[in-house]
Image (cartoon, rainbow, N blue to C red):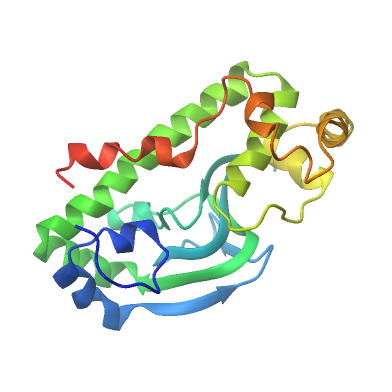
């Protein structure tokens, strides 16, 4: 049952039972996030759960030598902070990719509510399961897809989480998130731009990704397994 709160855009919050949403609402605080803001790192774990209202958060794994690869994105469909809810340290980096807003709540407070409210726990764990499925698909795409398809996938995975048809990025950023060298990632971006002048081929991006992309909403049926 979707809570009747018209101003909320976050998918997880909107799916909560009205009484569960009412219980946690006094502890939710709306915070503005600016592009490139670092939200967590291995040295500074995230202590809050962030329900994304707008914008995009990028999560990347980093090697001991400093090489980063994006493993997951969070938009208005979900939240960032699952490890803390599971009692684990958050040891990977997260930063703001697209400026927006989040509803933040201390993770330890949310855990208390989870333990008291089974439907709230089910809703949150359903999204955690969804994230696991998306991260597995990301790993598969990075392993088998050509670079051009991976670039298209990276762009489309952001566009599907925002209201606009454009967002700022640099070739260096794409290369860093895909674990590629700048020169090799620059060429596919140019090819995509030549295909369609409105935002790097926004209408042709789904076909440009080949088989290495599924819309975040395609994972939504995982919630039914939890009885949602």
* Image vertical order of residue 113 relative to residue 220, above or below: below
The residue shown at (76%, 56%) is 168
* Image vertical order of residue 91 relative to residue 10, above or below: above
Using the rendered image of the protein, determine whether residue 69 is visible from the camera's viewpoint. Answer: no
Using the rendered image of the protein, determine whether residue 72 is visible from the camera's viewpoint. Answer: yes
The residue shown at (31%, 40%) is 129
Seen as rendered, the residue at the extreme bottom is: 26
Could you tell whether 70 is left or right of 200 in the image?
left
Residue 94 in the image, given as x and y percentages of width and height = 56, 55
Q: Quadrant of residue 81?
A: bottom left
Q: Quadrant of residue 201?
A: top right
The residue shown at (31%, 63%) is 13
Could you tell whether 224 is left or right of 27 in the image?
left
Counting every numbered tag in the picture gives: 0
| 91 vs 228, nearest the viewer | 228
Could you tell whether 215 is left or right of 3 in the image?
right
Q: Quadrant of the N terminus?
A: bottom left
Could you tell whether 76 is left or right of 23 in the image?
right
Residue 144 in the image, given as x and y percentages of width and height = 61, 16
| 226 vs 47, nearest the viewer | 226
Seen as rendered, the residue at the extreme top is: 144
Q: Quadrant of residue 167?
A: bottom right
| 168 vs 79, nearest the viewer | 168
Residue 194 in the image, given as x and y percentages of width and height = 88, 33
Residue 25 in the image, given as x and y percentages of width and height = 28, 78
């Amino acid at each position: 049952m979707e809570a009747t709160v018209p101003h909320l855009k976050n998918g997880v919050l909107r799916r909560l039972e009205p009484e569960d949403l009412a219980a946690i609402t006094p502890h939710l605080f709306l915070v503005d996030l600016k592009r490139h803001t670092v939200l967590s790192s291995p040295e500074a774990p995230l202590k809050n759960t962030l329900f994304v209202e707008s914008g995009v958060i990028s999560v990347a794994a980093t090697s001991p030598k400093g090489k980063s690869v994006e493993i997951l994105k969070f938009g208005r469909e979900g939240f960032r902070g699952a490890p803390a809810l599971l009692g684990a340290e958050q040891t990977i980096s997260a930063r703001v990719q697209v400026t927006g807003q989040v509803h933040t709540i201390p993770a330890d407070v949310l855990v208390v509510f989870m333990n008291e409210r089974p439907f709230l726990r089910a809703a949150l764990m359903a999204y955690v399961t969804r994230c696991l499925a998306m991260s597995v698909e990301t790993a598969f795409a990075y392993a088998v897809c050509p670079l051009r398809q991976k670039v298209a996938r990276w762009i489309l995975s952001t566009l599907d989480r925002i209201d606009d048809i454009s967002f700022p990025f640099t070739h260096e950023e794409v290369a860093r998130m895909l674990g590629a060298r700048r020169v090799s990632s620059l060429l596919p971006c140019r090819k995509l731009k030549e295909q369609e002048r409105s935002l790097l081929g926004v209408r042709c991006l789904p076909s440009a990704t080949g088989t290495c992309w599924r819309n975040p909403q395609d994972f939504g049926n995982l919630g039914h397994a939890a009885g949602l």
